[in-house]
Image (spheres, rainbow, N blue to C red):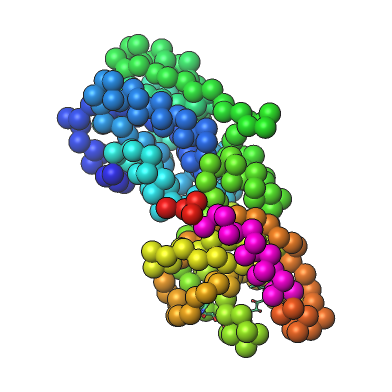
Amino acid sequence: MEVIYNHQEVNKKIEKGIALGNFDGVHMGHQKLIHHLLQKCQTKNLQPCVYTFMSHTMPVITNKGTLQYITNIDQKKKVFEDLGIELLVLDTFSKELMALSPEGFVEKILVQELNCKEVVVGFDYRFGYKAEGNPLLLKKLGEKYGFEVSIIDAVMMENEKISSTNIRQYLKNGDIEKVNLFLGRYFSLYSKVIHGDARGTKLGFPTANIFVDILQLIPKAGVYATLVKTGGEIYKGATAVGIKPTFEGKTPSIETFIMDFHGNLYDEYIEIYFVKRLRDEMKFDSPEDLVRQINKDIKEAKNHLQYNLNMLK
Ligand SMILES: Cc1cc2nc3c(=O)[nH]c(=O)nc-3n(C[C@H](O)[C@H](O)[C@H](O)COP(=O)(O)O)c2cc1C
Ligand SMILES: Nc1ncnc2c1ncn2[C@@H]1O[C@H](COP(=O)(O)OP(=O)(O)O)[C@@H](O)[C@H]1O
């Protein structure tokens, strides 16, 4: 899959089918949309492309601060590539772009720059100045400029609409199983191993602490059964999310004891897949009490994970 960071660098000669949206999470609804696009592209011999922005557009449009994301750019790239997208355009949501009317966006970006012959969007897609354009307008503009538009309905699961907003709420509540159901894969964090307080080894449980971008949405504080990918291998893990109240911690950290692993992970990138929430984070009276509980957590995590190890590629 080719990744381009500026619409001006796209090869205009190639006719494309394009999926439009923010795609945070690349959840089951997004995946349905992508599958629809791939089918259309195959029938019409078009290059399947996703056109999206480096950062979410809504906080910029509504001027409401920032929005934490479910999937970072690296993860989005991987999921789109795995789905079969051939070109990913990660454009900058610039002032010029923002100022384009809905028709201006269609004419300048979709038609002139991207050579678009097919567009697929979700039912709630908005575009153009102040997000004034909707899917019906896009359909009309498609007739004028010569491309077909498909509008994909919300995908439902357990009587609920799958949406990035719902997934964000479930993550905040620690309902990781619902998050995983809606994503159609395990929620994961992909980041670099950093130094912690160097206490883990002394306690008998070294933990790989990862760097967390303030824009990354993380699951509710607590202990989780996780799978950990490092060096191409997958291990079982027990991950603590929180401030370590036992040690009067203040800043949130994410740290993982990796089972059957020995080695140095500092500065390596690891991916942590959240499988099940085990308990809330607690303040223990002594480090010994914490260690007793960590032993129990590891046993419990192991039990939950024994059938899940093969679920990851
Ligand atoms: C499975 C597991 C569960 C944990 N649960 C708690 C907890 O409930 N409360 C707490 O204060 N710290 C908890 N911790 C975090 C430990 O306090 C932490 O691993 C230790 O302080 C080492 O930190 P360091 O890596 O920064 O040196 C947990 C760690 C693990 C691996
Ligand atoms: N089984 C393991 N699980 C997690 N980290 C391990 C393991 N074995 C060795 N390590 C290494 O030990 C480091 C954690 O040691 P720890 O004493 O907790 O220090 P820190 O506070 O810097 O995280 C990890 O970053 C990793 O490099």
Q: Is residue 249 left or right of residue 260?
A: right
Residue appearing at x 47%, y 38% in the figure: 22
Residue 5 at x, y percent in the picture = 31, 46
- Quadrant into which the N terminus falls: top left
Which residue is nearer to you in this view: 299 or 246? 299
Q: Position of residue 17 (x, y in %)?
A: 31, 27
The reply to whether residue 106 is in sight is no
Q: For this view, does 31 lie left or right of residue 18?
A: right
Which residues are drawn in magenta? Answer: 293-309
Above or below: residue 224 compared with residue 77:
below
Instruction: Write down the quadrant of residue 19 in the picture.
Output: top left
Residue 256 place in picture, x, y as percent: 58, 70
Nearer to us in this view, 297 or 203: 297
Q: Is residue 302 magenta?
A: yes
Give the percent coordinates (x, y) of residue 194: 50, 75
Question: 68 left or right of 147?
Answer: right
Image point 52% across, 32% down: which residue? 29
Most common secondary structure along the magenta stretch: helix
